[in-house]
Amino acid sequence: MIKPMVRNNICLNAHPQGCAAVVQRQIQYARKNLSPADSAECAAPKLVLVVGCSNGYGLASRICAAFGYGAATVGLSLENIPTEKRSGTPGYYNNEAFDREAAQAGLVSLSLNGDAYSNEMKAKAVEAIRQAAAKAGIPATIDLVVYSLASPARTDPQSGIMYKSVIKPIGAALSGKSLNMMDGTFTNFSVEPAREEDVFNTVKVMGGEDWELWMDALDKEGLLAPNTRTVAYTYIGPELSWAIYKNGTIGKAKEDLERACREINNNYTARNKISGAWVSVNKALVTRSSAVIPIIPLYISCLFTVMKEQGLHEGCIEQIARLYRERLYCGGQVPVDSEGRIRLDDWEMREDIQKAVIEKMKKVTPENVFAETDLAGFKHDFLEVHGFDVDGINYDKNSE
Ligand code: NAD
Protein backbone atom coordinates (compact mmCIF):
# COMPACT_ATOMS: atom_id res chain seq x y z
CA MET A 1 0.00 0.00 0.00
CA ILE A 2 1.51 3.30 -1.03
CA LYS A 3 0.54 6.54 0.72
CA PRO A 4 1.91 9.94 -0.27
CA MET A 5 5.07 11.05 1.55
CA VAL A 6 5.18 14.85 1.23
CA ARG A 7 7.88 17.08 2.77
CA ASN A 8 8.16 20.84 2.07
CA ASN A 9 5.93 20.66 -1.00
CA ILE A 10 8.00 17.79 -2.43
CA CYS A 11 6.39 14.36 -2.80
CA LEU A 12 8.90 11.56 -2.35
CA ASN A 13 6.93 8.67 -3.83
CA ALA A 14 4.36 7.81 -6.49
CA HIS A 15 1.45 5.43 -7.06
CA PRO A 16 1.67 3.26 -10.24
CA GLN A 17 -2.05 2.73 -10.86
CA GLY A 18 -2.85 6.34 -9.97
CA CYS A 19 -0.26 7.60 -12.47
CA ALA A 20 -1.63 5.24 -15.14
CA ALA A 21 -5.19 6.48 -14.55
CA VAL A 22 -4.09 10.10 -14.99
CA VAL A 23 -2.29 9.23 -18.25
CA GLN A 24 -5.45 7.45 -19.48
CA ARG A 25 -7.59 10.47 -18.67
CA GLN A 26 -5.25 12.75 -20.61
CA ILE A 27 -5.32 10.32 -23.53
CA GLN A 28 -9.12 10.48 -23.58
CA TYR A 29 -8.96 14.26 -23.64
CA ALA A 30 -6.49 14.29 -26.55
CA ARG A 31 -8.59 11.80 -28.54
CA LYS A 32 -11.70 13.87 -28.04
CA ASN A 33 -10.20 17.28 -28.68
CA LEU A 34 -7.67 16.81 -31.46
CA SER A 35 -7.80 15.19 -34.83
CA PRO A 36 -5.37 15.04 -37.77
CA ALA A 37 -8.16 16.52 -39.89
CA ASP A 38 -8.00 19.76 -37.81
CA SER A 39 -4.67 20.54 -39.30
CA ALA A 40 -5.37 19.74 -42.93
CA GLU A 41 -3.62 22.87 -44.23
CA CYS A 42 -0.52 22.20 -42.23
CA ALA A 43 -0.04 18.45 -41.93
CA ALA A 44 -0.23 17.08 -38.40
CA PRO A 45 3.07 15.74 -37.03
CA LYS A 46 3.80 12.08 -37.73
CA LEU A 47 7.14 11.64 -35.96
CA VAL A 48 7.70 13.53 -32.72
CA LEU A 49 10.58 13.76 -30.24
CA VAL A 50 9.76 14.92 -26.70
CA VAL A 51 12.73 15.74 -24.47
CA GLY A 52 11.33 15.67 -20.92
CA CYS A 53 8.37 13.46 -21.86
CA SER A 54 7.32 11.94 -18.57
CA ASN A 55 5.49 14.65 -16.63
CA GLY A 56 3.75 17.98 -16.85
CA TYR A 57 3.94 19.83 -20.15
CA GLY A 58 6.20 17.28 -21.85
CA LEU A 59 3.89 14.36 -21.09
CA ALA A 60 0.88 16.32 -22.35
CA SER A 61 2.84 17.21 -25.52
CA ARG A 62 3.57 13.55 -26.17
CA ILE A 63 0.00 12.44 -25.45
CA CYS A 64 -1.51 15.08 -27.75
CA ALA A 65 0.90 14.18 -30.59
CA ALA A 66 0.27 10.45 -30.28
CA PHE A 67 -3.39 10.16 -29.34
CA GLY A 68 -4.57 13.40 -30.95
CA TYR A 69 -2.68 13.14 -34.25
CA GLY A 70 -1.58 9.48 -34.37
CA ALA A 71 2.14 10.36 -34.33
CA ALA A 72 4.94 7.91 -33.61
CA THR A 73 6.75 9.32 -30.58
CA VAL A 74 10.18 9.03 -29.04
CA GLY A 75 10.27 10.28 -25.45
CA LEU A 76 13.23 10.86 -23.20
CA SER A 77 13.23 11.51 -19.46
CA LEU A 78 15.27 10.82 -16.35
CA GLU A 79 13.47 8.51 -13.96
CA ASN A 80 14.09 6.36 -10.90
CA ILE A 81 13.16 2.75 -11.46
CA PRO A 82 11.23 1.22 -8.52
CA THR A 83 13.17 -0.96 -6.10
CA GLU A 84 12.07 -3.28 -3.28
CA LYS A 85 12.28 -0.37 -0.84
CA ARG A 86 11.42 2.68 -2.92
CA SER A 87 8.72 3.51 -5.43
CA GLY A 88 9.74 4.74 -8.87
CA THR A 89 9.32 8.39 -9.83
CA PRO A 90 5.89 9.31 -11.25
CA GLY A 91 7.48 9.71 -14.69
CA TYR A 92 8.58 6.09 -14.64
CA TYR A 93 4.96 4.93 -14.21
CA ASN A 94 3.67 7.56 -16.65
CA ASN A 95 6.05 6.34 -19.37
CA GLU A 96 5.09 2.74 -18.69
CA ALA A 97 1.39 3.61 -18.96
CA PHE A 98 1.97 5.70 -22.08
CA ASP A 99 3.84 2.89 -23.86
CA ARG A 100 1.19 0.34 -22.88
CA GLU A 101 -1.68 2.51 -24.12
CA ALA A 102 0.21 3.40 -27.31
CA ALA A 103 0.87 -0.28 -28.06
CA GLN A 104 -2.82 -1.08 -27.54
CA ALA A 105 -3.77 1.71 -29.92
CA GLY A 106 -1.29 0.51 -32.55
CA LEU A 107 0.90 3.61 -32.12
CA VAL A 108 4.68 3.46 -32.26
CA SER A 109 6.33 4.71 -29.07
CA LEU A 110 9.83 4.39 -27.68
CA SER A 111 10.69 5.72 -24.23
CA LEU A 112 14.28 6.26 -23.14
CA ASN A 113 15.45 6.72 -19.57
CA GLY A 114 18.63 8.74 -19.16
CA ASP A 115 20.26 12.15 -18.98
CA ALA A 116 19.02 14.30 -21.87
CA TYR A 117 22.03 16.61 -21.47
CA SER A 118 24.50 13.84 -22.33
CA ASN A 119 25.93 13.02 -25.75
CA GLU A 120 25.19 9.37 -25.07
CA MET A 121 21.42 9.92 -24.74
CA LYS A 122 21.37 12.15 -27.81
CA ALA A 123 22.96 9.28 -29.78
CA LYS A 124 20.44 6.82 -28.32
CA ALA A 125 17.57 9.14 -29.22
CA VAL A 126 18.84 9.35 -32.82
CA GLU A 127 18.79 5.54 -33.02
CA ALA A 128 15.32 5.42 -31.44
CA ILE A 129 13.98 7.98 -33.94
CA ARG A 130 15.23 5.82 -36.85
CA GLN A 131 13.71 2.72 -35.27
CA ALA A 132 10.39 4.47 -34.64
CA ALA A 133 10.25 5.72 -38.24
CA ALA A 134 11.02 2.23 -39.58
CA LYS A 135 8.34 0.65 -37.38
CA ALA A 136 5.78 3.25 -38.42
CA GLY A 137 6.79 2.97 -42.09
CA ILE A 138 7.43 6.73 -42.43
CA PRO A 139 10.50 8.77 -43.42
CA ALA A 140 13.05 9.25 -40.62
CA THR A 141 12.67 13.01 -40.38
CA ILE A 142 11.16 14.60 -37.30
CA ASP A 143 8.09 16.78 -37.65
CA LEU A 144 8.13 18.15 -34.12
CA VAL A 145 10.79 18.44 -31.40
CA VAL A 146 9.36 19.41 -28.01
CA TYR A 147 11.96 20.57 -25.49
CA SER A 148 10.37 20.41 -22.03
CA LEU A 149 13.07 19.80 -19.44
CA ALA A 150 12.85 21.06 -15.88
CA SER A 151 15.99 19.96 -14.10
CA PRO A 152 17.96 20.88 -11.00
CA ALA A 153 21.35 20.02 -12.53
CA ARG A 154 23.26 19.54 -15.77
CA THR A 155 26.62 18.03 -16.55
CA ASP A 156 28.15 19.85 -19.51
CA PRO A 157 28.93 17.12 -22.05
CA GLN A 158 32.06 18.95 -23.27
CA SER A 159 33.75 19.88 -20.00
CA GLY A 160 32.21 17.27 -17.68
CA ILE A 161 31.45 20.05 -15.15
CA MET A 162 28.18 19.70 -13.26
CA TYR A 163 26.09 22.86 -12.83
CA LYS A 164 23.21 23.26 -10.38
CA SER A 165 20.27 25.57 -10.99
CA VAL A 166 18.87 27.69 -8.16
CA ILE A 167 15.70 29.71 -7.79
CA LYS A 168 16.92 33.02 -6.36
CA PRO A 169 16.21 36.72 -6.79
CA ILE A 170 18.87 38.93 -8.36
CA GLY A 171 20.12 42.13 -6.73
CA ALA A 172 18.24 41.99 -3.41
CA ALA A 173 17.12 39.36 -0.93
CA LEU A 174 13.49 38.35 -1.01
CA SER A 175 11.33 37.41 1.93
CA GLY A 176 7.66 36.71 2.33
CA LYS A 177 5.17 34.07 3.26
CA SER A 178 5.23 30.66 1.75
CA LEU A 179 2.11 28.49 1.66
CA ASN A 180 2.29 24.86 2.68
CA MET A 181 -0.18 23.20 0.37
CA MET A 182 -0.79 20.17 2.55
CA ASP A 183 -2.23 21.98 5.59
CA GLY A 184 -2.69 25.59 4.47
CA THR A 185 -0.17 26.96 6.98
CA PHE A 186 2.13 29.85 6.13
CA THR A 187 5.81 29.96 6.94
CA ASN A 188 8.22 32.83 6.50
CA PHE A 189 10.77 32.40 3.76
CA SER A 190 13.81 34.44 2.98
CA VAL A 191 16.07 33.94 -0.02
CA GLU A 192 19.46 35.61 -0.37
CA PRO A 193 20.18 37.28 -3.71
CA ALA A 194 21.95 35.16 -6.30
CA ARG A 195 25.69 35.37 -6.73
CA GLU A 196 27.03 35.83 -10.23
CA GLU A 197 27.88 32.15 -10.48
CA ASP A 198 24.31 31.19 -9.44
CA VAL A 199 23.01 33.05 -12.48
CA PHE A 200 25.62 31.47 -14.74
CA ASN A 201 24.91 27.97 -13.41
CA THR A 202 21.13 28.31 -13.71
CA VAL A 203 21.47 29.52 -17.30
CA LYS A 204 23.71 26.52 -18.01
CA VAL A 205 21.02 24.14 -16.70
CA MET A 206 17.71 25.75 -17.70
CA GLY A 207 18.85 28.01 -20.56
CA GLY A 208 18.78 27.16 -24.24
CA GLU A 209 22.27 25.73 -24.86
CA ASP A 210 21.11 22.13 -24.64
CA TRP A 211 18.12 22.78 -26.94
CA GLU A 212 20.60 24.06 -29.56
CA LEU A 213 22.79 20.97 -29.02
CA TRP A 214 19.75 18.76 -29.63
CA MET A 215 18.93 20.53 -32.89
CA ASP A 216 22.58 20.30 -34.01
CA ALA A 217 22.69 16.58 -33.15
CA LEU A 218 19.48 15.92 -35.11
CA ASP A 219 20.73 17.99 -38.05
CA LYS A 220 24.07 16.13 -38.19
CA GLU A 221 22.16 12.87 -38.46
CA GLY A 222 19.92 14.18 -41.23
CA LEU A 223 16.78 13.96 -39.10
CA LEU A 224 15.55 17.51 -39.71
CA ALA A 225 13.44 18.51 -42.69
CA PRO A 226 11.83 21.71 -44.02
CA ASN A 227 8.62 20.83 -42.16
CA THR A 228 10.33 20.23 -38.78
CA ARG A 229 9.00 22.44 -35.99
CA THR A 230 10.45 22.82 -32.54
CA VAL A 231 9.04 24.36 -29.38
CA ALA A 232 10.32 24.96 -25.83
CA TYR A 233 8.31 26.20 -22.86
CA THR A 234 8.66 29.22 -20.65
CA TYR A 235 6.75 31.19 -18.04
CA ILE A 236 6.49 34.93 -17.44
CA GLY A 237 3.70 35.37 -14.89
CA PRO A 238 2.42 38.42 -13.05
CA GLU A 239 4.60 41.19 -11.62
CA LEU A 240 4.11 39.93 -8.08
CA SER A 241 6.20 36.86 -8.97
CA TRP A 242 8.91 38.63 -10.97
CA ALA A 243 11.39 39.05 -8.09
CA ILE A 244 11.64 35.28 -7.77
CA TYR A 245 10.83 34.23 -11.33
CA LYS A 246 11.14 36.55 -14.34
CA ASN A 247 13.79 38.86 -12.84
CA GLY A 248 15.53 36.09 -10.92
CA THR A 249 17.95 33.33 -11.87
CA ILE A 250 15.31 31.23 -13.64
CA GLY A 251 14.17 34.27 -15.64
CA LYS A 252 17.76 34.75 -16.86
CA ALA A 253 17.77 31.11 -17.98
CA LYS A 254 14.47 31.65 -19.79
CA GLU A 255 15.93 34.75 -21.52
CA ASP A 256 18.68 32.43 -22.72
CA LEU A 257 16.05 29.98 -23.98
CA GLU A 258 14.65 32.81 -26.12
CA ARG A 259 18.18 33.62 -27.33
CA ALA A 260 18.58 29.96 -28.32
CA CYS A 261 15.25 30.09 -30.16
CA ARG A 262 16.49 33.06 -32.23
CA GLU A 263 19.76 31.20 -32.93
CA ILE A 264 17.89 28.08 -34.07
CA ASN A 265 15.74 30.22 -36.34
CA ASN A 266 18.86 31.96 -37.75
CA ASN A 267 20.72 28.71 -38.29
CA TYR A 268 17.92 26.49 -39.52
CA THR A 269 14.65 28.28 -40.32
CA ALA A 270 16.31 31.11 -42.26
CA ARG A 271 18.07 28.49 -44.41
CA ASN A 272 14.88 26.53 -44.98
CA LYS A 273 16.29 23.59 -43.04
CA ILE A 274 13.30 23.59 -40.67
CA SER A 275 9.91 25.27 -40.60
CA GLY A 276 10.43 27.17 -37.33
CA ALA A 277 11.40 27.29 -33.66
CA TRP A 278 9.19 28.84 -31.00
CA VAL A 279 9.18 29.54 -27.32
CA SER A 280 5.70 29.08 -25.92
CA VAL A 281 4.74 31.00 -22.78
CA ASN A 282 2.51 28.61 -20.86
CA LYS A 283 0.15 29.00 -17.94
CA ALA A 284 1.23 28.47 -14.32
CA LEU A 285 0.26 24.94 -13.38
CA VAL A 286 0.89 22.46 -10.62
CA THR A 287 3.74 20.19 -11.64
CA ARG A 288 6.58 18.63 -9.70
CA SER A 289 8.76 21.64 -10.58
CA SER A 290 6.39 24.54 -9.94
CA ALA A 291 5.29 23.53 -6.42
CA VAL A 292 8.70 24.36 -4.92
CA ILE A 293 8.89 27.97 -6.13
CA PRO A 294 8.06 30.44 -3.30
CA ILE A 295 4.89 32.54 -3.88
CA ILE A 296 3.71 30.18 -6.66
CA PRO A 297 1.49 27.89 -4.48
CA LEU A 298 -0.42 30.90 -3.09
CA TYR A 299 -0.63 32.58 -6.50
CA ILE A 300 -1.80 29.39 -8.24
CA SER A 301 -4.40 28.70 -5.53
CA CYS A 302 -5.88 32.18 -6.10
CA LEU A 303 -5.50 31.96 -9.90
CA PHE A 304 -7.31 28.62 -10.08
CA THR A 305 -10.27 29.96 -8.06
CA VAL A 306 -10.66 32.91 -10.42
CA MET A 307 -10.11 30.95 -13.65
CA LYS A 308 -12.48 28.17 -12.57
CA GLU A 309 -15.15 30.75 -11.71
CA GLN A 310 -14.74 32.23 -15.21
CA GLY A 311 -14.74 28.82 -16.93
CA LEU A 312 -11.19 29.47 -18.21
CA HIS A 313 -9.25 26.94 -16.19
CA GLU A 314 -6.90 24.60 -18.06
CA GLY A 315 -4.45 21.88 -17.04
CA CYS A 316 -1.36 20.72 -18.99
CA ILE A 317 -3.36 18.62 -21.45
CA GLU A 318 -5.83 21.41 -22.26
CA GLN A 319 -2.97 23.90 -22.70
CA ILE A 320 -1.06 21.65 -25.08
CA ALA A 321 -4.15 20.66 -27.08
CA ARG A 322 -4.73 24.42 -27.57
CA LEU A 323 -1.06 24.89 -28.47
CA TYR A 324 -1.33 22.33 -31.27
CA ARG A 325 -4.85 23.13 -32.49
CA GLU A 326 -4.79 26.93 -32.31
CA ARG A 327 -1.11 27.79 -32.63
CA LEU A 328 1.35 25.24 -34.10
CA TYR A 329 -1.03 23.32 -36.37
CA CYS A 330 -3.80 25.81 -37.02
CA GLY A 331 -2.88 26.24 -40.69
CA GLY A 332 -1.11 29.36 -41.92
CA GLN A 333 1.14 31.46 -39.72
CA VAL A 334 1.72 30.50 -36.08
CA PRO A 335 0.18 33.33 -34.03
CA VAL A 336 2.85 35.01 -31.87
CA ASP A 337 3.35 38.16 -29.75
CA SER A 338 5.60 41.12 -30.61
CA GLU A 339 8.64 39.13 -29.39
CA GLY A 340 7.81 36.14 -31.58
CA ARG A 341 6.58 34.01 -28.65
CA ILE A 342 3.49 31.82 -28.62
CA ARG A 343 1.18 32.92 -25.78
CA LEU A 344 -0.80 30.20 -24.03
CA ASP A 345 -0.81 32.33 -20.89
CA ASP A 346 -3.21 34.73 -22.63
CA TRP A 347 -6.16 33.78 -20.41
CA GLU A 348 -4.09 33.76 -17.20
CA MET A 349 -2.70 37.22 -17.98
CA ARG A 350 -6.04 38.80 -18.96
CA GLU A 351 -6.43 42.09 -17.11
CA ASP A 352 -9.70 41.12 -15.38
CA ILE A 353 -8.26 37.77 -14.26
CA GLN A 354 -5.09 39.31 -12.84
CA LYS A 355 -7.07 42.06 -11.08
CA ALA A 356 -9.31 39.48 -9.40
CA VAL A 357 -6.31 37.31 -8.42
CA ILE A 358 -4.50 40.24 -6.80
CA GLU A 359 -7.65 41.21 -4.89
CA LYS A 360 -7.97 37.65 -3.66
CA MET A 361 -4.34 37.40 -2.62
CA LYS A 362 -4.75 40.51 -0.47
CA LYS A 363 -7.67 38.93 1.40
CA VAL A 364 -6.05 35.56 2.18
CA THR A 365 -5.26 34.75 5.81
CA PRO A 366 -4.25 31.44 7.42
CA GLU A 367 -7.85 31.18 8.69
CA ASN A 368 -9.62 31.61 5.35
CA VAL A 369 -7.11 30.15 2.89
CA PHE A 370 -9.16 27.01 2.13
CA ALA A 371 -12.41 28.98 1.79
CA GLU A 372 -11.04 31.93 -0.23
CA THR A 373 -8.69 30.09 -2.56
CA ASP A 374 -8.53 26.83 -4.46
CA LEU A 375 -5.82 25.43 -2.22
CA ALA A 376 -7.80 22.18 -2.20
CA GLY A 377 -7.49 22.10 -6.00
CA PHE A 378 -3.77 22.83 -5.82
CA LYS A 379 -3.27 20.04 -3.26
CA HIS A 380 -5.34 17.65 -5.35
CA ASP A 381 -3.41 18.44 -8.54
CA PHE A 382 -0.10 18.08 -6.73
CA LEU A 383 -1.03 14.68 -5.30
CA GLU A 384 -2.45 13.62 -8.65
CA VAL A 385 0.85 14.41 -10.40
CA HIS A 386 2.25 11.62 -8.19
CA GLY A 387 -0.67 9.25 -8.76
CA PHE A 388 -2.45 10.01 -5.47
CA ASP A 389 -5.96 11.33 -4.83
CA VAL A 390 -7.04 9.98 -8.23
CA ASP A 391 -10.70 9.09 -8.74
CA GLY A 392 -11.39 5.38 -9.02
CA ILE A 393 -8.16 4.21 -7.35
CA ASN A 394 -8.46 2.22 -4.13
CA TYR A 395 -5.52 3.39 -2.05
CA ASP A 396 -6.21 0.87 0.71
CA LYS A 397 -5.53 -2.00 -1.66
CA ASN A 398 -2.05 -3.35 -2.22
CA SER A 399 -0.38 -1.87 -5.27
CA GLU A 400 1.06 -4.38 -7.72
P1 NAD B 1 8.01 18.56 -14.87
O1 NAD B 1 8.85 18.54 -13.65
O2 NAD B 1 6.59 18.14 -14.78
O3 NAD B 1 8.73 17.69 -16.03
C1 NAD B 1 10.11 17.82 -16.30
C2 NAD B 1 10.56 16.73 -17.24
O4 NAD B 1 11.98 16.86 -17.43
C3 NAD B 1 10.34 15.30 -16.72
O5 NAD B 1 9.95 14.47 -17.79
C4 NAD B 1 11.73 14.88 -16.25
O6 NAD B 1 11.97 13.48 -16.27
C5 NAD B 1 12.58 15.57 -17.30
N1 NAD B 1 13.98 15.73 -16.91
C6 NAD B 1 14.52 16.46 -15.91
N2 NAD B 1 15.86 16.35 -15.94
C7 NAD B 1 16.18 15.53 -16.96
C8 NAD B 1 17.39 15.05 -17.51
N3 NAD B 1 18.59 15.39 -17.02
N4 NAD B 1 17.34 14.20 -18.56
C9 NAD B 1 16.13 13.82 -19.09
N5 NAD B 1 14.97 14.27 -18.63
C10 NAD B 1 14.99 15.12 -17.57
O7 NAD B 1 8.16 20.05 -15.44
P2 NAD B 1 7.13 21.04 -16.14
O8 NAD B 1 6.56 21.94 -15.09
O9 NAD B 1 6.23 20.34 -17.08
O10 NAD B 1 8.17 21.96 -16.96
C11 NAD B 1 8.53 21.70 -18.30
C12 NAD B 1 8.86 23.03 -18.96
O11 NAD B 1 7.69 23.86 -18.96
C13 NAD B 1 9.96 23.80 -18.23
O12 NAD B 1 10.78 24.45 -19.15
C14 NAD B 1 9.16 24.83 -17.44
O13 NAD B 1 9.91 25.99 -17.13
C15 NAD B 1 8.03 25.12 -18.41
N6 NAD B 1 6.83 25.74 -17.81
C16 NAD B 1 6.26 25.22 -16.69
C17 NAD B 1 5.15 25.87 -16.14
C18 NAD B 1 4.48 25.35 -14.87
O14 NAD B 1 3.73 26.07 -14.25
N7 NAD B 1 4.72 24.11 -14.50
C19 NAD B 1 4.59 27.01 -16.75
C20 NAD B 1 5.17 27.47 -17.93
C21 NAD B 1 6.30 26.83 -18.45
Image (tube, grey):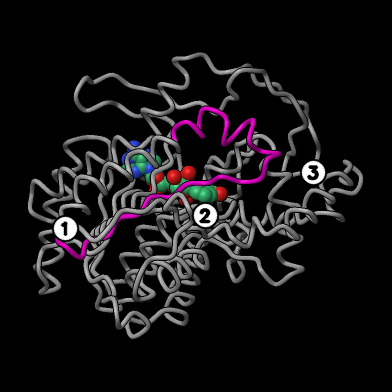
Q: Earlier in the sequence, mark 2 or mark 1?
A: 1
Circle 1 residues within 10 Å: few <14, some 14–19, many ≥20: some
Q: Give the residue number, with chain letter if any, for mark 2.
A: 282
State which mark lies toward you, 2 or 1: 1
Determine the CA span between mark 3 and mark 1: 52 Å
Q: Residue 184 carries which label?
A: 3
Q: Earlier in the sequence, mark 2 or mark 3?
A: 3
Point out residue 317 in the picture as x, y percentages from the top left corner: 49, 66
Quadrant of the drawing holding the C terminus? bottom left
Determine the CA span between mark 2 and mark 3: 26 Å
Point out residue 199 in the picture as x, y percentages from the top left corner: 46, 22
Q: Which of 309 and 356 is in front in this view?
A: 356
Disc 3 within 8 angstroms of ligand 1 (CB):
no
Disc 2 within 8 angstroms of ligand 1 (CB):
yes
- Magenta segment, which residues? 225-253
**In the image, is residue 93 above or below residue 264?**
below
User: Which of the 4 image quadrants contains residue 160?
Assistant: top left
Q: In this view, does 7 lie to the left or right of 204?
A: right
Disc 1 within 8 angstroms of ligand 1 (CB):
no
State which mark lies toward you, 3 or 1: 1
- Which element carries disc 3, helix, strand or loop? loop
Circle 2 residues within 10 Å: few <14, some 14–19, many ≥20: many
Q: Residue furthest bottom?
A: 37
Name which residue lies at 22% across and 44% down: 214
Q: Does the magenta stretch include residue 229?
A: yes
- Which element carries disc 1, helix, strand or loop? loop
Q: Give the residue number, with chain letter if any, for mark 1.
A: 272
